[in-house]
Amino acid sequence: MASVLLILLLVAPLAAPFAHQDSRAAGVYTTCYSERDLAGYYFTFTEDQPVLSDASFDDVIDSVTQTGMWLYYEDENYDASLSGKVYWGHGIDYSFTFPVEYSDLTSSLRSAGDKAVLNADTWTVYDGTYFKGDTLTGSEEASSLGDMDGRASSMIVTGHANWTVYSETAFSGLHACVYSGQDHDHLGDQDFVLSVIPDLTTEGIFGNAIRSIRTGCHSNNTLFVPELTVQHRAANGAWGYFDL
Ligand SMILES: [Ca+2]
Protein backbone atom coordinates (compact mmCIF):
# COMPACT_ATOMS: atom_id res chain seq x y z
CA MET A 1 0.00 0.00 0.00
CA ALA A 2 2.85 2.35 0.91
CA SER A 3 4.51 1.78 -2.46
CA VAL A 4 1.28 2.51 -4.32
CA LEU A 5 0.87 5.75 -2.45
CA LEU A 6 4.47 6.68 -3.20
CA ILE A 7 3.94 6.08 -6.92
CA LEU A 8 0.83 8.25 -6.90
CA LEU A 9 2.75 11.01 -5.17
CA LEU A 10 5.52 10.78 -7.75
CA VAL A 11 3.18 10.70 -10.74
CA ALA A 12 0.80 13.45 -9.69
CA PRO A 13 3.22 16.39 -10.14
CA LEU A 14 4.15 15.10 -13.59
CA ALA A 15 0.52 14.83 -14.65
CA ALA A 16 -0.43 18.29 -13.45
CA PRO A 17 0.95 20.33 -16.40
CA PHE A 18 -1.34 18.44 -18.78
CA ALA A 19 -4.45 19.30 -16.79
CA HIS A 20 -4.81 22.66 -18.50
CA GLN A 21 -8.57 22.84 -18.10
CA ASP A 22 -10.08 24.31 -14.94
CA SER A 23 -10.85 21.31 -12.75
CA ARG A 24 -14.30 22.75 -12.04
CA ALA A 25 -15.16 22.60 -15.74
CA ALA A 26 -15.53 18.81 -15.73
CA GLY A 27 -18.38 18.68 -13.25
CA VAL A 28 -21.04 20.86 -11.69
CA TYR A 29 -20.55 23.50 -9.02
CA THR A 30 -22.14 26.62 -7.67
CA THR A 31 -20.10 29.34 -6.03
CA CYS A 32 -22.50 31.32 -3.85
CA TYR A 33 -21.77 34.89 -2.70
CA SER A 34 -23.13 36.80 0.27
CA GLU A 35 -23.46 40.05 -1.70
CA ARG A 36 -24.73 41.13 -5.10
CA ASP A 37 -22.59 40.86 -8.24
CA LEU A 38 -20.28 38.14 -6.90
CA ALA A 39 -19.11 40.20 -3.91
CA GLY A 40 -18.83 39.46 -0.21
CA TYR A 41 -17.80 36.09 1.15
CA TYR A 42 -18.42 32.95 -0.83
CA PHE A 43 -18.52 29.18 -0.76
CA THR A 44 -18.33 26.66 -3.61
CA PHE A 45 -20.72 23.72 -3.45
CA THR A 46 -20.26 20.61 -5.58
CA GLU A 47 -22.70 18.44 -3.64
CA ASP A 48 -26.34 18.78 -2.64
CA GLN A 49 -26.80 20.79 0.55
CA PRO A 50 -30.10 20.09 2.33
CA VAL A 51 -29.31 22.35 5.30
CA LEU A 52 -27.28 25.42 4.36
CA SER A 53 -26.95 26.47 7.99
CA ASP A 54 -24.61 23.47 8.33
CA ALA A 55 -22.25 25.35 6.02
CA SER A 56 -22.94 28.65 7.80
CA PHE A 57 -24.57 29.86 4.60
CA ASP A 58 -28.26 30.06 5.51
CA ASP A 59 -30.26 33.02 4.15
CA VAL A 60 -27.22 34.88 2.82
CA ILE A 61 -26.96 34.05 -0.90
CA ASP A 62 -27.30 37.12 -3.17
CA SER A 63 -25.46 35.99 -6.32
CA VAL A 64 -23.88 32.87 -7.81
CA THR A 65 -21.56 31.58 -10.50
CA GLN A 66 -22.48 28.05 -11.51
CA THR A 67 -22.09 25.18 -13.93
CA GLY A 68 -24.92 22.67 -14.25
CA MET A 69 -28.60 22.81 -13.34
CA TRP A 70 -28.95 24.06 -9.76
CA LEU A 71 -32.08 24.54 -7.70
CA TYR A 72 -32.17 26.97 -4.77
CA TYR A 73 -34.89 26.56 -2.14
CA GLU A 74 -36.29 29.03 0.36
CA ASP A 75 -36.66 26.28 2.96
CA GLU A 76 -34.38 23.55 4.25
CA ASN A 77 -34.54 19.99 2.93
CA TYR A 78 -35.53 21.11 -0.55
CA ASP A 79 -38.74 22.69 0.55
CA ALA A 80 -40.60 19.45 1.11
CA SER A 81 -43.32 21.48 2.88
CA LEU A 82 -44.25 22.80 -0.59
CA SER A 83 -44.70 26.38 0.60
CA GLY A 84 -41.52 28.24 -0.30
CA LYS A 85 -39.92 29.81 -3.33
CA VAL A 86 -37.72 27.86 -5.72
CA TYR A 87 -35.06 29.42 -7.95
CA TRP A 88 -33.38 27.62 -10.81
CA GLY A 89 -30.30 28.33 -12.88
CA HIS A 90 -28.61 26.33 -15.62
CA GLY A 91 -25.44 27.14 -17.47
CA ILE A 92 -21.69 26.91 -17.85
CA ASP A 93 -19.69 29.28 -15.65
CA TYR A 94 -22.87 31.36 -15.64
CA SER A 95 -23.29 34.21 -13.13
CA PHE A 96 -26.38 36.01 -11.91
CA THR A 97 -27.64 38.11 -9.00
CA PHE A 98 -30.98 37.41 -7.36
CA PRO A 99 -33.39 40.39 -7.16
CA VAL A 100 -33.29 42.16 -3.80
CA GLU A 101 -36.67 40.79 -2.75
CA TYR A 102 -35.43 37.26 -3.48
CA SER A 103 -32.01 37.55 -1.88
CA ASP A 104 -30.93 36.19 1.51
CA LEU A 105 -33.58 33.47 1.37
CA THR A 106 -31.91 30.25 0.23
CA SER A 107 -31.78 27.54 2.88
CA SER A 108 -31.01 24.47 0.73
CA LEU A 109 -29.68 23.79 -2.75
CA ARG A 110 -28.99 20.87 -5.06
CA SER A 111 -28.13 20.06 -8.66
CA ALA A 112 -29.96 17.90 -11.20
CA GLY A 113 -28.27 15.19 -13.24
CA ASP A 114 -24.70 13.95 -12.99
CA LYS A 115 -22.36 15.83 -10.66
CA ALA A 116 -19.12 14.61 -12.23
CA VAL A 117 -19.97 14.95 -15.93
CA LEU A 118 -21.88 18.08 -16.88
CA ASN A 119 -23.70 16.91 -19.97
CA ALA A 120 -24.14 13.24 -19.08
CA ASP A 121 -27.38 11.59 -20.21
CA THR A 122 -29.57 11.56 -17.10
CA TRP A 123 -33.12 11.80 -15.85
CA THR A 124 -34.10 13.12 -12.44
CA VAL A 125 -37.60 12.89 -10.96
CA TYR A 126 -38.95 14.76 -7.92
CA ASP A 127 -41.69 13.93 -5.46
CA GLY A 128 -43.08 17.46 -5.52
CA THR A 129 -43.89 19.88 -8.28
CA TYR A 130 -41.20 22.50 -8.89
CA PHE A 131 -38.46 20.02 -7.96
CA LYS A 132 -39.28 19.82 -4.27
CA GLY A 133 -38.88 16.96 -1.85
CA ASP A 134 -37.49 13.48 -2.46
CA THR A 135 -35.68 12.77 -5.71
CA LEU A 136 -34.18 10.00 -7.81
CA THR A 137 -31.57 10.36 -10.58
CA GLY A 138 -30.69 7.73 -13.16
CA SER A 139 -28.31 7.49 -16.10
CA GLU A 140 -29.73 4.23 -17.43
CA GLU A 141 -33.18 2.80 -17.94
CA ALA A 142 -35.04 1.70 -14.83
CA SER A 143 -37.74 -1.00 -14.81
CA SER A 144 -38.89 0.33 -11.44
CA LEU A 145 -38.36 3.61 -9.61
CA GLY A 146 -38.41 1.87 -6.22
CA ASP A 147 -39.42 4.27 -3.46
CA MET A 148 -40.22 6.87 -6.12
CA ASP A 149 -42.67 4.63 -8.02
CA GLY A 150 -45.77 6.64 -8.88
CA ARG A 151 -44.58 9.75 -7.07
CA ALA A 152 -42.86 11.94 -9.69
CA SER A 153 -44.46 15.37 -10.01
CA SER A 154 -41.61 17.11 -11.83
CA MET A 155 -38.68 16.00 -13.96
CA ILE A 156 -35.39 17.18 -15.48
CA VAL A 157 -33.38 15.45 -18.21
CA THR A 158 -29.80 16.38 -19.14
CA GLY A 159 -27.67 15.38 -22.10
CA HIS A 160 -28.67 14.38 -25.60
CA ALA A 161 -30.59 11.17 -24.84
CA ASN A 162 -34.36 10.97 -25.03
CA TRP A 163 -36.37 8.76 -22.67
CA THR A 164 -39.73 7.02 -22.50
CA VAL A 165 -41.73 7.10 -19.28
CA TYR A 166 -44.29 4.41 -18.41
CA SER A 167 -47.21 4.38 -16.00
CA GLU A 168 -46.38 0.82 -14.88
CA THR A 169 -43.17 -0.98 -13.95
CA ALA A 170 -41.20 -3.03 -16.51
CA PHE A 171 -41.92 -0.55 -19.33
CA SER A 172 -45.64 -1.27 -19.50
CA GLY A 173 -48.87 0.66 -19.19
CA LEU A 174 -49.31 4.10 -20.73
CA HIS A 175 -46.20 5.67 -22.21
CA ALA A 176 -44.81 8.94 -23.52
CA CYS A 177 -41.46 10.24 -24.77
CA VAL A 178 -39.49 12.92 -22.99
CA TYR A 179 -37.25 14.81 -25.39
CA SER A 180 -34.11 16.51 -24.18
CA GLY A 181 -32.87 19.73 -25.74
CA GLN A 182 -35.50 22.29 -24.72
CA ASP A 183 -32.60 24.43 -23.51
CA HIS A 184 -29.00 24.51 -24.69
CA ASP A 185 -26.14 26.37 -23.00
CA HIS A 186 -22.82 26.81 -24.74
CA LEU A 187 -19.42 28.16 -23.69
CA GLY A 188 -16.14 27.48 -25.50
CA ASP A 189 -16.06 23.78 -26.32
CA GLN A 190 -18.65 22.91 -23.66
CA ASP A 191 -22.36 22.27 -24.17
CA PHE A 192 -25.13 21.66 -21.68
CA VAL A 193 -28.42 20.34 -23.05
CA LEU A 194 -31.50 19.82 -20.90
CA SER A 195 -35.28 19.78 -20.64
CA VAL A 196 -37.15 20.90 -17.54
CA ILE A 197 -40.73 19.91 -16.63
CA PRO A 198 -41.76 21.75 -13.42
CA ASP A 199 -45.24 20.21 -13.13
CA LEU A 200 -46.00 16.71 -14.40
CA THR A 201 -49.46 16.82 -12.84
CA THR A 202 -50.63 18.87 -15.81
CA GLU A 203 -49.62 15.97 -18.07
CA GLY A 204 -52.72 13.85 -17.64
CA ILE A 205 -51.99 10.36 -16.36
CA PHE A 206 -48.29 10.99 -15.87
CA GLY A 207 -48.62 13.12 -12.74
CA ASN A 208 -47.61 10.83 -9.87
CA ALA A 209 -47.78 7.84 -12.18
CA ILE A 210 -44.32 7.19 -13.63
CA ARG A 211 -43.10 3.74 -12.61
CA SER A 212 -40.42 2.91 -15.21
CA ILE A 213 -38.16 4.81 -17.61
CA ARG A 214 -36.60 3.40 -20.78
CA THR A 215 -33.73 4.79 -22.85
CA GLY A 216 -34.77 6.30 -26.17
CA CYS A 217 -38.19 7.23 -27.54
CA HIS A 218 -40.58 4.27 -27.90
CA SER A 219 -43.96 6.00 -27.99
CA ASN A 220 -46.10 8.14 -30.25
CA ASN A 221 -47.00 10.28 -27.25
CA THR A 222 -44.81 13.14 -26.05
CA LEU A 223 -44.68 14.82 -22.67
CA PHE A 224 -45.00 18.57 -23.07
CA VAL A 225 -41.89 20.48 -22.03
CA PRO A 226 -42.95 24.07 -21.26
CA GLU A 227 -40.81 27.08 -21.98
CA LEU A 228 -39.67 28.42 -18.64
CA THR A 229 -40.08 32.09 -17.78
CA VAL A 230 -36.54 33.38 -17.49
CA GLN A 231 -35.24 36.41 -15.62
CA HIS A 232 -32.09 36.46 -17.71
CA ARG A 233 -30.72 34.41 -20.57
CA ALA A 234 -27.26 34.36 -22.17
CA ALA A 235 -25.51 31.95 -24.53
CA ASN A 236 -23.98 30.18 -21.52
CA GLY A 237 -27.01 30.03 -19.24
CA ALA A 238 -30.35 31.22 -17.93
CA TRP A 239 -32.07 31.60 -14.58
CA GLY A 240 -35.53 32.19 -13.16
CA TYR A 241 -37.78 31.35 -10.25
CA PHE A 242 -41.13 29.87 -9.37
CA ASP A 243 -43.04 32.35 -7.25
CA LEU A 244 -45.24 29.88 -5.42
CA1 LIG B 1 -34.74 30.48 4.04
Image (cartoon, rainbow, N blue to C red):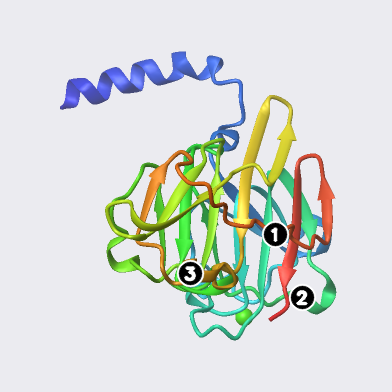
Q: Is residue 134 above or below residue 27?
A: below
Callout 1: 10 Å neighbours few (<14), some, many (20+)?
Answer: few
Q: Quadrant of the N terminus?
A: top left
Disc 2 marks a residue whose amino acid type is Tyr
The numbered mark, 1 or 3, whose residue comes first in the sequence reads: 3
Question: How far across and down, in percent of the image, does residue 234 sit?
Answer: 83, 45
Q: Secondary structure at mark 2?
A: helix
Q: Is residue 111 left or right of residue 216?
A: right
49 or 170: nearer the eye?
Answer: 170
Does the residue tagged 2 have its C-beta within 8 Å of any atom of ligand 1? no
Q: Is residue 175 above or below residue 101?
A: above
Q: Do labels 1 and 3 touch, CB within 8 Å?
A: no
Quadrant of residue 169 in the image? bottom left
Q: Residue under label 1, please give it.
A: 226
Q: Is residue 76 left or right of residue 187?
A: left
Q: Secondary structure at mark 1?
A: loop
Q: Residue under label 2, please give it.
A: 102
Quadrant of residue 165 in the image? bottom left
